[in-house]
Amino acid sequence: MGIIKKIRKNLSSAFNKIFKRGNLRRIGIYGPPNAGKTTLANRIVRDFTGDVVGSVSDIPHETRRAHRREGVTIESNGSAITLDIVDTPGLATKIDFQDFMAKGLSEDESRRRAKEATEGVIEAVRWLEDLEGVILVMDATEDPFTQVNVTVIGNMEARNLPLLIVANKIDLDDSMPSRIKSAFPQHPMVPISALNGDNIDVMYEKIAEHFG
Amino acid sequence: MKGIQMDLVSSDKLDRLSSVEKIRMILDSVEDGKIIVLERGLTPQEETKLIEATMTKITPGEFAGIEIESYPGAVHQSWFDKLRKKPVDRARLTVIGPADQLKMLKRDRDVISAMVSAR
């Protein structure tokens, strides 16, 4: 692509971004299985609409279909932003039905869940193309350097789209949100407990600031 | 001699392959029980395509997926790179293997520590 064409394309993209402010934005909640994505989606939607998005469980891949909640208006510090929130299935590079059996599911149920989970991961990957920003949920008790986290961050950086990292589960004694900050210093990070609501107001401020 | 085959793929070879060919090469090798080491990593878009293709291959009791780890690329772009929307550097060395044979022990920006076991 010629340099003039490239400059024109970038100017057009910047112009669109400026005039898109205030419009509805579609934001995906991503992360590995059991990071607390649906707990967070439920927290956001419950706080601003009184409803919930999906069920949660200790068994990985409880969410096996993406759920979109349209027009959630998040208010923070006197400003408001309206978002479409997409809760996505956990991203993974491996799914072993025996892991579900270890959690007490029958073999048939485990095989079925494994199959549905693979379809869920494909759906989550395909949603990435249709989003205008991502909230990446990481479990603050786990090693943040996972391929799933690196892949989601890489995709957002390559497309120049906003990304907010949420270090979840800070209510647990062994959580270390600082480890996440030092792993990905180039992106804003907010430590929270989606379960208890700890620091959730700060997260809403960051969402308004970042995706507004 | 019994053992596990490792294929170390140079960046020159990777440059000659299309995204589809890279993903096909990786999945074919991993399904055969090989460990692949790429001298230079995949782009973020190729990584998502690899995840998607892996999911279609998973068969309970036969193939559980892949383990993949790489050191991340450089994190900082100059303002000029941002203005030109130059993509962030892709990941550097990348290790990929069958999920039931390759287990990552520890990873940070510059060291990947992994355990490989026979089937």
Image (cartoon, coloured by chain):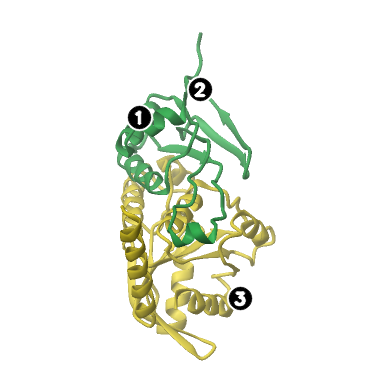
Q: x%, y% of residue A113?
A: 35, 49
Measure how far apart labels 1 and 2 are at the Cα level. 21 Å
Disc 3 residue type? Asn
Q: Tag 2, which secondary structure?
A: loop
Q: Are marks 1 and 3 on the same chain?
A: no
Residue drawn at (48%, 44%) of the image = A102
Q: Is residue A86 in view?
A: yes
The disc at residue B7 is: none
Front-lying residue, B20 or A195: B20
Q: Tag 3, which secondary structure?
A: loop
Residue carrying label 1: B25
Disc 1 residue type? Met
Residue carrying label 2: B118
Q: Please say if the residues under marks 1 and 2 sit with CB atoms less than 8 Å apart.
A: no
Residue drawn at (61%, 57%) of the image = A180
Residue carrying label 3: A199
Q: Residue furthest bottom?
A: A78
Tell which chain the image draws in green.
Answer: B
Q: x%, y% of residue A182?
A: 65, 56
Q: Residue furthest top?
A: B1
